[in-house]
Image (cartoon, grey):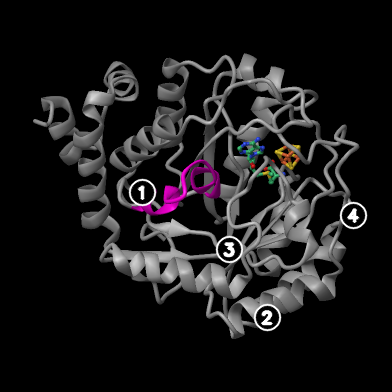
Amino acid sequence: MQRPDFLQKAIISHQLSKEEIVQLLGNPQYDQALFTAADEVRQKFVGDEVHLRGLIEFSNICKNNCLYCGLRRDNLKLKRYRMSPEEIVALARRAVKDFGFKTIVMQSGEDLWFTPERLKPILAEIKKLDVAITLSIGEKSFEEYKAYKEAGADRYLIRIETTDKDLYHRLDPGMSWDERKECLVNLGKLGYEVGSGIMVGLPGQTLESIADDLLFLQDMQIDMAGIGPFIPHPDTPLKDEKGRAFELSLRTMAIMRLLLPDINIPATTAMETLHPEGRIIALQCGANVIMPNVTEGEYRQLYELYPGKAALNETPLHSKTSIGARIEAIGRKIGTGYGSHKKL
Ligand code: SAM
Ligand code: SF4
């Protein structure tokens, strides 16, 4: 299909109006042109390397009650766990020494047990392995973020989820959109590489609001953007919602690549959950990062944000080798460095 003029211009200018974004999101006939454009921009700005990040899900305990998430505090069916500091460090060591990861991502619910006093020594220990550390542990004060930065954290992921404030406040009871945005600002001030992102296909979310989200992320000049489909969890209030918007998530991700051409964009696990080749397809529509799960044993099943989370039964070794082969099969190569955002 012929590329529409506005898309051709966006490849050069990295600008799209809200109306143009809505057109791209709502018209499958543009898909091929959009995905090829995003792939070209990805190739030009971040090359063919795919950076792998080893993901450790170290606690599924959460004080929050987000309506969409299986870890929400009111989900009493979920068996909760919290890894010990020794377990976390041992997993990180294995991920680095046995599997060669150059970045460790530490993710959890908002678990208040992990105070700076407890988390800082863990970060310091992992940092000795000569890796980049990404944290994804939710909303914290400026001082707490500062303490983690000083202890060795380099990057931080905190999705804004949606920029529709009414929708956000409906879905995240007791939380404040402005405070979440403030977290992004504070992380930037502290010199973190900042990752944000959204869920696509939330109940009540419109194409216009996704366009606003994309323009917001561009305006914030974030360093990484995680864009994933919302998948309803049976033990949450959103269990009967539709979600599962695979194509729309791909389009959103591809547009993100056009708007912020040199950032890191993961092919998300949620995409792989909806399609057996979801991450590989995403890598061909603008993504350049994969975060294989290196959490082991029962913990992996228990970090259940949504049902059917991809690769649940894989071992970390299998995750890495099978993904590595699939990356090479599409003519890409595994990144050898830390894979930081070029801007930095
Ligand atoms: N607790 C931290 C936070 O909320 O920022 C980090 C962990 S949280 C589980 C990571 C992300 O999972 C959230 O930002 C949200 O976008 C995503 N998530 C939660 N429930 C989901 C669902 N049902 N479908 C898809 N993604 C989901
Ligand atoms: Fe907790 Fe994060 Fe899930 Fe919200 S999305 S309930 S903060 S783990």
Q: Secondary structure at mark 3?
A: loop
Label 2 sits on residue: 93
Whole-angstrom CA distance, mark 2 to mark 4, is 22 Å
Left or right: where 71 falls relative to 283: right
User: Residue type at mark 4?
Assistant: Trp
Q: Which residues are magenta?
A: 269-283
Query: In the rendered image, is residue 154 in sight?
Result: yes
Label 1 sits on residue: 281
Residue 216 vs 310, above or below: the answer is above
Q: Position of residue 41 (x, y in %)?
A: 23, 48
Whole-angstrom CA distance, mark 1 to mark 3, is 29 Å
User: Residue type at mark 3?
Assistant: Asp
- Mark 2 and mark 1 lie on one chain; the one further toward the N terminus is 2
Of badges 2 and 1, nearer the viewer stands: 1
Answer few, some or many: residues within 10 Å of disc 2's Cα (few below 14, many 20 plus, some between 14 and 19): some
- Mark 1 and mark 3 lie on one chain; the one further toward the N terminus is 3
- Mark 2 and mark 4 lie on one chain; the one further toward the N terminus is 2
Q: Is residue 35 magenta?
A: no
Query: In the rendered image, is residue 190 in sight?
Result: no
